[in-house]
Amino acid sequence: MAQFIRWGKLVLVAAAIGVGAYLLIALWIAPGHPGSYDRAGTVENLAPYLILVLIAVVIGLALYAIAKHAVKHGIQEAQQTVPPNERSPHPPGFPVVTRESESAAPADGPGQYRIQGVHRQSKMDISKYIQADCAANAKIKAELDDIVVSSVTKAPL
């Protein structure tokens, strides 16, 4: 019902504008006393302008309706949510590769490991790179070199 009332108001405003435009054109084309017979603003002379005004009102209403429908449809489309199973597995845009993920090696596996610890005999802090198949093997190799291991991290590639 509210939509009907809104459209009714729109038609009334358009009609008022049309009648006002018609009267404005009639006074502009044919100034003078309305009762005189030699006045140029008779119905026959103003009919083409009335038709132009009516066409302009109809075109204006049509454009308003199209714009209103487009905006309403756009808002409804923006408010709709896509169910998770229908979403694209890959979002649009360029893939972003961070520096860490580009250079980070797997947490365990063959490669070079940085061993930090303390040398048993000299009691000095030491940091050493060891080639090993896994982190546990790197720790064992460091312990065979008399190093008490405090941390093992895989070196970046």
Image (cartoon, grey):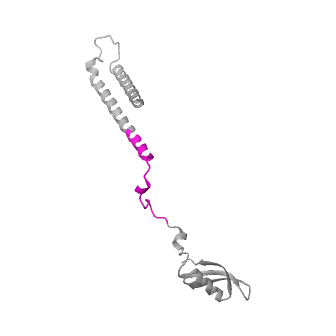
In the image, 67 versus 88, the foreground residue is 88
- Left or right, 63 with respect to 119, comes to left
Which residue reaches farthest left? 44
Task: Tell me the quarter of the picture where residue 70 sits.
Answer: top left
In the image, 108 versus 22, the foreground residue is 108
Quarter of the figure that contains the C terminus: bottom right
In the image, 65 versus 25, the foreground residue is 65
Magenta range is 69-96
Looking at the image, which residue is at 34% across and 13% down?
Answer: 34
In the image, 65 versus 44, the foreground residue is 65
- Left or right, 27 with respect to 141, comes to left
Count of residue discs? 0
| Vertical arrangement, residue 31 with respect to residue 9, above or below | above
Quarter of the figure that contains the N terminus: top left
Measured as percent of width and height from the top left, residue 52 is found at: 30, 28
Task: Tell me the quarter of the picture where residue 18 sits.
Answer: top left
Measured as percent of width and height from the top left, residue 100 is found at: 55, 70
Looking at the image, which residue is at 30% across and 24% down?
Answer: 50
Measured as percent of width and height from the top left, residue 11 is found at: 37, 27
Looking at the image, which residue is at 54% across and 82% down?
Answer: 111
| Vertical arrangement, residue 42 with respect to residue 109, above or below | above
- Left or right, 139 with respect to 5, comes to right
| Vertical arrangement, residue 2 with respect to residue 94, above or below | above
- Left or right, 2 with respect to 114, comes to left
| Vertical arrangement, residue 36 with respect to residue 52, above or below | above
Looking at the image, which residue is at 49% across and 64% down?
Answer: 96
